Image: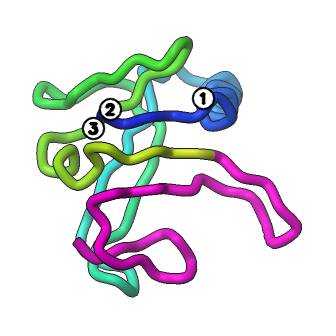
């Protein structure tokens, strides 16, 4: 199970509202890359893939492909705002190590 904090849900809903096109949800995926081996990616999607898991959170839905789901299972996604900047923060129990930027991890 993936958890979205209320702040993350609110932020995603705002992005969807401002997209200017029909959006079914936010895709969260994991791919090879980044400074620790795997990196997170997020993008708004106009349709879900046939094999996607669609996870509803109030007014927003997450779309997760079957390859990424095991690496995201148990993850909490938050949106943080600070003096250093703002962005999505992943607390991933599957990550053995993470880089300082918080955008990549080692599994």
Question: 25 or 4, which is in the foreground?
Answer: 4
The residue lying at 49 percent from left, 56 percent from top is 90
Q: Are marks 3 and 2 in contact (CB under 8 Å)?
A: yes
Q: Neighbour class for label 1 at 10 Å: few (<14), some, many (≥20)?
A: many
Tell me which label, 3 or 1, sits earlier in the chain. Answer: 1
Q: Which residues are magenta?
A: 79-107
Q: Neighbour class for label 3 at 10 Å: few (<14), some, many (≥20)?
A: many
User: In this figure, which residue is indicated by the disc labeled 1?
Assistant: 9
In magenta segment, residue 93: yes
User: In this figure, which residue is indicated by the disc labeled 3?
Assistant: 64
Residue occupying the far top of the picture: 58
User: In this figure, which residue is indicated by the disc labeled 2?
Assistant: 63
Q: Neighbour class for label 2 at 10 Å: few (<14), some, many (≥20)?
A: many
Question: 59 or 93, which is in the foreground?
Answer: 93
**Left or right of 13 in this view: 22:** left
Specify the quadrant that holds the C terminus. Answer: bottom left
């Amino acid at each position: 199970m993936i958890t979205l904090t209320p702040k993350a849900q609110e932020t995603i809903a705002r992005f969807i509202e401002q997209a200017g096109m029909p959006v079914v949800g936010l895709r969260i995926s994991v791919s090879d890359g980044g400074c620790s081996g795997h990196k997170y990616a997020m993008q708004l999607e106009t349709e879900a893939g046939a094999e996607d898991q669609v996870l509803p959170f109030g007014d927003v839905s997450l779309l997760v492909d079957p390859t990424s789901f095991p690496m995201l299972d148990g993850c909490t996604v938050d949106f943080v705002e600070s003096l250093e900047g703002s962005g999505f923060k992943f607390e991933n129990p599957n990550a053995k190590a993470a880089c300082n930027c918080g955008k990549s991890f080692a599994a």
